Image (cartoon, grey):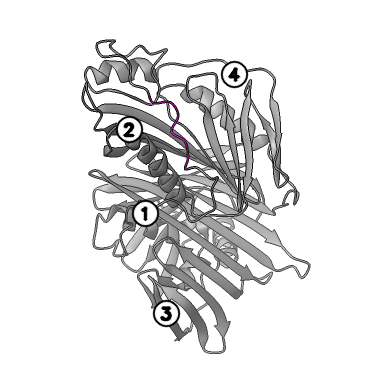
Amino acid sequence: MHASSNERRFILLTTKIGLCALLAVTSACATSQAGSTDSPPDRASPASAPAAGDDTKPAEGAGGAPAESNGAKSAQDSGQWLQKLMARELDLPSSAVEYDSGQHSGSVLSRELLKVERAEGLTYIGATLGTATPIECYIYDGAMDVASSINGVGRQVMNAVGQSHGGIEVIQPASIDAGAMGAFPFLYVTWVYRAKGSGAGPTVGILKQMAVMTDHQVTICHHNEPGYDKAFRQWMAHLATNYRNKNGSVQYRLLEVSKDEVNGSPVGLSVVRVKTDGDGDFRRETFSAFLGRRGTEVLAMDRATVEFTDADGRLISGGYFDSQGTDLSVKQVATGYEVTGKHVGKDVRFEVAADAPACTATRVERELAKMLRAPGQQTYVCHTFFSGSPDKLVEVKATEREAVNPMAFGLEMGPMSMTVFYDGPNKPVSTELQAGPATIKSVMVYREGQP
């Protein structure tokens, strides 16, 4: 792990680097670009690929009868057709149906549970929403790369559609949303796709997908039918809040969920989870997932960091992972840091000398809290690694902007600068970074516990 995994998530150092890589908007954002993920997630799945539902095209000249059309539709008059279908909603049942796969259990707001199947590493659920197409879910046993996996599962579904419609010509994310349903972070994507079709010509379809994170695992569900947005969200919220794992629940000292935006449009989410052990040491986990597009190309990026610190915030060890081939561990040694693992797919092992403390989350958080409590211009300096060069230290400087906003900090890291906004000590609420024409912002949407 290079030290960007030791950064406090709320100051968004790792997250902002990731967003810059996703955007590739300025030379200051000089990290590896996120590529599209065409392959399905590397997880076990039921015997058949994710079913795409019944995508029968309405009879030629029917104009796309909304009540009958699901999945794909003739491209002729598709604008009016899509608007009409995407406005559809329905009321979900007032009572729920229970499911239990042994590893995972809970309930769904459906009149009928079509299938529950246990496979290696996951549970598959098929259930009715009350429309022509069922909802299908994959409840994975552990943590995973959320953005890359939701992208991969979506492509599986659309490839299945393409097999019966002459292949897929275009796939684009129509909308992206992120946030928290109570304590459960989610990433929600609506895809527009066009298949070659036959007879009447190309067909157009809408696929809704949502990934929800709970204590132990990630659930990815999809509904391949236009409309029913509120119903799908409500169905997913019930699934998340009524989920049970045979291993029980995890108690966190701190849980934070933030929505990440570019120019006001959501592109992903960041999650922080903090636990303490019997010795009083801290384990801090950070998960970040981003989805975007460049032309017709879908960009996906996932990052995960873990840091272990003592009660004073000193680094013990840590780990850093991203979906572009980086998997590093770091520990403090007498002269600085020892870093081992893979960086962008290449084996690395080296030591980096340091004459300043590491930017661990716990330490930075406490220093900024002190600065908020004490009036006057103050500065805190620590060291981290720029994710593009894990063998080089970069100075990070936090300065209180008392003249502009007494509850804000200016933060500089190498060529990057941003502003962190607070609503009181230990209560960060948002972070903002200007990168060329793009304004990158992270807004906290859920917080429980204390650092």
Tell which circle, 4 or 2, labels the residue nearer the N-terminal end.
Answer: 4
Q: Can you tell which quarter of the image residue 397 is in?
A: bottom left
Is 240 left, or right, of 196 in this rendering?
right
Residue annotated with mark 4:
92
Tell which circle, 1 or 2, labels the residue nearer the N-terminal end.
Answer: 1
Could you tell me the amino acid type at mark 4? Leu
Secondary-structure class at tag 4: loop
Give the number of the disc on residue 347: 3
Q: Which residues are magenta?
A: 49-55
Is 242 left, or right, of 350 in this rendering?
right
Q: Can you tell which quarter of the image residue 395 is in?
A: bottom left
Q: Position of residue 17 (x, y in %)?
A: 37, 60
Of discs 1 and 2, which sits in the foreground? Answer: 2
Residue annotated with mark 1:
19
Could you tell me the amino acid type at mark 1? Leu
Q: CA distance from mark 3 to mark 2?
A: 39 Å
Q: Main secondary structure of the magenta part?
A: loop
